Image: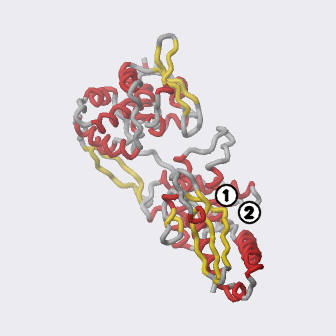
Amino acid sequence: MANVSFRLNKGKRTPDKTKEYSVYIRVTSGRGKDYNGSLGIKVKPDDWNSQRERIKNRSTLPLRDKHNRILDNLTAYFSEHAINLKHTSKHDYIIRVKELITAFFRDTKSSDINFFSFVEEYIIKAETIPNTQTGKPVSLSTLRGYTTTLNALKRYDKYEKKVSFESIDMDFYYSFIEWCEEQDYTPNTIGTHIKRIKQFMNAANDEGVTTNKEHLNRKFIKPAEETDEIYLTIEELQQMYDLDLTHEPIKEKVRDLFCLGANTGLRVSDYCCLSKFNLKIENGTKWLHVRMKKNGKLVHIPLNTNATKIVEKYEVIGFPQLDGSIINKHITVIGEMIGLTEIERFYITRGGKKVECLKRRCDRIKSHTARRSFCSNAYLAKVPSHDIMVISGHSSEKIFLNYIKLNEVEKATKIGEHAFFK
C-alpha cells in the first residue's frame, strides 16, 4: 500500500518564521520506493500543523480550505493507485508517481473552476498584483474584507446550496439578503457584501470564466443606511488630551494616537503606523506626509497645537505601533474616564427592521471616530469641504459628506449661518 505524507520544507528546519516554505508530498511503497516532491503550495511555519500535516484553520489564510482539500484528495488518489505502485519497479517508481501527480492536477484544474475557487484565487492574486488605480497591491484591510465576504458566502451556501457563477441572479440576490438579515447583519454590512460579489463577478466576466451578467441588473444594488457613528467635539477631544494617563502607559499611547488622528484626519491604519519619516519640516513648520494605506494617496497634513505636541513627544523615542483592536479596547474606557457616560438613543436596521438602541456615549467611540471627528469639526469650523478632502484623502464629496456626523440642531445652525438666512 502507498503511504502518503506531507511535510513543510521537505522536513528540514524552517528557521525564518516570516518566510513561506513549500509543502512537499512523500509517497512510499516499501523496498526503497520513495518519492519527495514540492506541490507548489507555500505556507509559513506557524500556519502549518505538523501533526495533522495540514494548513491550520485560520481566517487570515483564504486558500487554506482549497489547499487542505488538495492534500486530502491526493491522499485518497494515491490510495486508489496503491496496487499499481506496488507492482511498479523501483527503477520506474519515481517516474510513475510524477505521472500520477501531473494527471491529478490536470484533472483537478479542469474540474475545479467554480465560484469559490475563483474567488480564492482572486484574493491571492490581489495580494501581489497592483491595483489599476493605485499601482499597488490592495491593502491588508481590503484583503480581509474579501475573505469576510467569501466566508459569508460559504456559510450561506451551506444554508441554500446555490452559490455558483450561474446562480448569481436576482433570485440569489433576494435570497442572500434575506439570509443576511436573519444573521442580524446591518444594511451597510449587507451592502458591502453585495458590492464585493459584484466585484468578483466582474473579474470572472473579464477573465472569461463566466458569461453571466445578472449582477449588472439595475436592481442588484448595494443596500445602505446612515451609520450610527458619532464624532467627538473639540471640547471633548481637549478633555481627552488633557487627561493625565502617565500611570497607565498603554492608555496614554492609545489616547495620543487617537487625538492625533482626530486632529489630522488619518485612518486608524495610518495613525497607528507612523514613524519619524512621516514628519517633514518646511519653512520652519512641521507637517505630516503620509502615503495612505487604503488608497495609496500621498497627503500633506498641517499640524495644530495638540497634534504638534503629540508628534514632538514621539519623534525621538518612536511612535507607538498599536493595532486597531487595542485602540477600540481602551478608547471607550478613556471616554468613560472623561465623563462621556450620558445615554444616547439611535436606530439601526436588524433583520430588515428598525431597532432602537441605547448606549453610553463613551461606548460608541471607536478607532474610526477620530477621522470622523476631524472631518466634522473642520466642517463646523467653516473649512471648505474641498480643503478638508485634500487632507483626508476622500475622492468624492458624496463619500466625504457621509463622515459629517452632525445632529439636527448642529445641521440647522450650520445652514442658518449661510448668507441666504441673514
Q: Is residue 161 above or below residue 320?
A: below
- Give the quarter of the image for residue 39: bottom right
Task: Kindly tell me whether residue 15 is visible in this rendering.
Answer: yes
For the residue pair 29 and 183, the one nearer the viewer reads as 29
Q: Name the disc covering residue 201, or none.
A: 1
- Type of the residue with mark 1: Met
For the residues labelled 1 and 2, the Cα–Cα distance comes to 8 Å
- Mark 2, other Cα within 10 Å: few <14 / some 14–19 / many ≥20: some
Q: Name the disc covering residue 60, or none.
A: none
The answer to whether the residue labelled 1 contacts the one labelled 2, judged by CB atoms less than 8 Å apart, is: yes
Helix, strand or loop for disc 2: loop
What percent of the width, then of the height, locates residue 104? 71, 74
Residue highlighted by disc 2: 210
| Residue at x 23%, y 30% (from the top left corner) | 244
Q: Is residue 122 above or below residue 80?
A: above
| Residue at x 41%, y 58% (from the top left corner) | 350
| Residue at x 54%, y 67% (from the top left corner) | 154
